[in-house]
Amino acid sequence: MSILVGADTRLVVQGITGREGEFHTRASIAYGTKVVAGTRPGKGGQTAIDGTIPIFDTVAEAAKQTGANTSVIYIPAAGAPDAIFEAVDAGIATIICITEGIPALDMIPAVEAVRRAGARLIGPNCPGVTSPGRAKVGIIPASIHKPGRVGVVSRSGTLTYEAVQAMTDAGLGQSTCVGIGGDPIIGTTFLDVLKLFRDDPETDAIVMIGEIGGSAEEEAAAFAAEHLKGVPMAAFIAGRTAPPGRRMGHAGAIISGGSGTAAEKMAALEAAGVRVADSPTQLPRLLLEAGYRP
Amino acid sequence: MKIQEADAKSLLLAQGLPVPPWKVARTPAEIEAAARSYFVEGAGRVVIKAQVLVGGRGKAGGVKLAASPAEAADIGSRILGMDIKGIKVRKVLVGAAADIVKEYYLGAIIDRASRRITLMASAEGGVEIEEVARQNPGAIHRVSADPLLGLLAFQARALGLAIGLRDPLLSPFVTIAQGLFATMKANDADLVEINPLAIVSEKAADGSATQRLVCLDAKITLDDSGLARHKGLEALRDLDEEDPTDAEARRLGINFIHLDGTIGCMVNGAGLAMTTMDLVKHYGGEPANFLDVGGGARHETVCGAMELILADPHVNAILVNIFGGITRGDEVAEGLIEARAEQKRAVPMVVRIVGTNADEAARLLKEANFETAASLDEAAEKAVALSKGASL
């Protein structure tokens, strides 16, 4: 079954004619994702990706004509919040926003619009979602994945690749890998994804990759302690050596007022029975120690 | 981006908040002149406040009162040049000392959990809010602004009532709270704090005393992602307090943070860059920097990043860790080869490149005799050994 994206995904690419949009759409198609449409206002009626994908002026038109149920946004920061509003208005159920550098205050009304519509937003500033063997939406390299039953959720990009590669190398395949994004205001949190994994019959173990800043890892730990008993879980938290008060690349990765430290998050996870790795390469071993058998 | 108190006060004033006048002075003579102007206007004393972008300046002796222009110059000359948490004081703010009746705290933050702007207020003002949060968390009252409508008057009123304000100060408080919210929105701030927001007693011309709420201090941090769309905010960046490499990193589009260790790190992706630092530490070394070259880094970025790392004389080993996705391993390898050819100082380096075009990268690095590593852990261990003087 997997979560968020899979065999049922019918994808519309918002910003399909841009450099990033086109490049990653090709990779998604090559992976077997059903890309049904692209949007580029003013170029409706034309085609993209060597004449294979129809371009529409609006997401609403794309959804109506192609039955698109999922969108991915490769639109620069200035236009990305509007792209989210447009996708919500068109009735898209799952919206995945890759765009980095959106001002946080722009995301407050955007996530509210998504919430009111009962839709789901992943990101922004995220690498996307892959359900190995089924669908790949976003920029995660296809080569690192192996189909399996471990759910992976992460705030990071390349660090996720590192962890997923380590799992694949160890023979542990993944049900779905979700990059939730490194910004302070994101559509879907660790907690939301843990709930989805709990309810997914094809996910038997979970890997969580967090980092300094905020308290989303602590909230996830509290949920895991209560609702994920018996589910093998391992985690890695980046930023043990990060100095306080400095933004570590991601807009959300900052220790402020002494809170949001790696130590607090690791302690909360360990107290919840989650095994915490010193290096992402240890994650497969910790999952096995927690009783997971692929 | 952090900005100085004086600039934060200007942003509050622009939204109509009550901020008493101030002057910024950089020399004892300027301090004396500024102080004199306030004494002429009838001030009993003046306050002199160090302008630095770190907290705790009061405890460090960076905030003092003076009773005459001469005393202001004397005290000011000692504050100028003072070292506060590693920052040299280059300028001070001078203003008339207020007759404070009571101090409050009022702040606004981007609240990740509620995904809204949350205002916080406390009747325990004038002390660090983190301290209040630890000692007496019940003293901090919160209200989250509506995500679409903003901070509504009834919400601001509830906050004012919660901290004990009543007529005739409640209505001005509502105006101030909404002005604080407006300041946040107008500048893409991610934090706006007024601490203290104070009830001050002021003498009118006829000698009668009145009380009013004023913003005596201001702290604002701006969302870096919003800077480009507000004219004039970039000019508030205080280059005096910046590490000189920061400006160069910004120009190159690199996320760079200088640290105190000896192992220079070059990584793609912020999470992986933090992890690389963490592993350096885990294997017994100390990272000299956080450096994320970003997605799709090529030659010039790699060369620029190498120069930033080598500009730190304490760096005695370099660890390059690239997980190619958008970034192509061979382009990074070419950049490294070029950077090493131009390198002014021979520093041992270990390189690990995996992902997109890693095979081509491996071939290039082998031909150029680079020390390489297959895994992140191996790379970190080797870098630590190199830093400690081992030859691999």
Image (cartoon, rainbow, N blue to C red):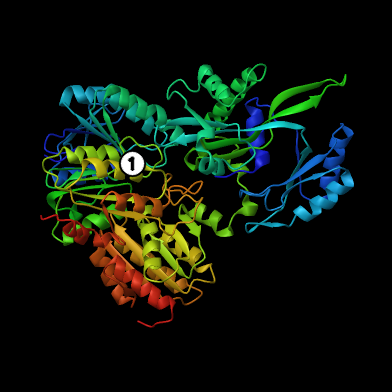
How many marks do you count on the picture? 1
Return the residue nearer the eye: B68 or B91. Answer: B68
Residue B253 against residue B315 in the figure, above or below: above
- Residue at point 25%, 49% (across, down): A140
Q: Please tell me how crowded label 1 is: few (under 14), some (14-19), or many (20+) other residues with Cα within 10 Å.
A: some
Left or right: A267, with B236 as reference point: left
- Residue at point 30%, 42% (across, down): A222
Say what amino acid the circle numbered 1 marks: Glu
Residue B11 position in % (x across, y down): 63, 33
Q: Can you see residue A49? A: no
Left or right: B257, with B28 as reference point: left
**In this figure, which residue is indicated by the disc labeled 1?**
A219
For disc 1, the chain is A
Q: Which quadrant of the figure has residue A78?
A: top left
Residue B328 against residue B51 in the figure, above or below: below
Residue B318 against residue A146 in the figure, above or below: below
Residue A76 position in % (x across, y down): 38, 38
Return the residue nearer the eye: A181 or B142. Answer: B142
Query: Dividing the image into 4 quarters, which one contains the N terminus of chain B?
Result: top right
Q: Can you see residue B100? A: yes
Query: Dividing the image into 4 quarters, which one contains the C terminus of chain B?
Result: bottom left
- Residue at point 26%, 25% (across, down): A118
Left or right: A66, with B262 as reference point: left
Residue B95 position in % (x across, y down): 77, 38
Residue B304 position in % (x across, y down): 47, 61
Secondary structure beneath disc 1? helix
